[in-house]
Image (tube, rainbow, N blue to C red):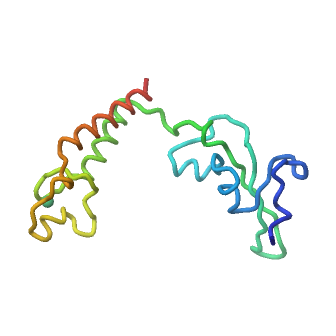
Amino acid sequence: MPHARYLDPTGEKYGLPTYPWGAAWVLDDDLATRKQLAAMGLRPAGQEPAAQLMWGSRRGKGRRVRTALLYRISLSKPKLPMTRARARSLAAAMRARHTCPSCHLVFMYCIPTSLGQCPNCEYDTVPEDWELGYQDADAYFAAVDSAWLENAA
Ligand SMILES: [Zn+2]
């Protein structure tokens, strides 16, 4: 346990529950750094940090102890309020990623960027039923759209 000195789950030593770098996810999967929250489109939204990460950095001379505050994912809020316009543009962007630019069919999967079109256009094959599910896709996008609109309200 090389990082045991940075492990203090009760906060007795450091005043805030403290985990070594990389360990917090294992111990409590509701915790995330501000940067990890941002990657999920979330922000801490005024909550106090629930814990911190601590690790030794060898950059420059000597050894510095560095920390990163951890926040609860469950208490975080979306970074930007979800507006009707944002929900629509996100749904449209998702739909575009599922639409083949060559045959204009909507697929259940994202069109592979390596091909630039659906595999059926690329290899001159006929799409299978499960691939298309055009109706299903419509229902899916409608459901996603209304979920976002509910959050906006
Ligand atoms: Zn196609």
Please state if 89 lies on the left or on the right of 38 as rendered. left
- Residue furthest toward the top? 153
Question: Relative to 94, is 70 on the left or the right?
Answer: right
Can you say which quadrant of the picture contains the N terminus? bottom right
Residue in front for this viewpoint, 67 or 9? 9
Residue depicted at x 28% and y 35%:
142
Residue 31 in percent (x, y) is at: 66, 48
Q: Which image quarter has ligand 1? A: bottom left
Image quadrant in which you'd find residue 116: bottom left
The extreme bottom residue here reads 61
Q: Is residue 149 above or below residue 5?
A: above
The percent coordinates of residue 50 (x first, y second) are 74, 43
In the picture, which quadrant includes the C terminus? top left
Q: Residue furthest front?
A: 129
Q: Residue at x 31, y 40 (%)?
A: 89
Q: Is residue 1 left or right of residue 127?
A: right
Residue depicted at 75% across the width and 73% down the height: 59
Q: Residue shown at 76%/61% (left/top)? A: 20
User: How many marks do you count on the picture?
Assistant: 0
Left or right of 92 on screen, residue 19: right
> Residue 28's x, y, as percent?
68, 50
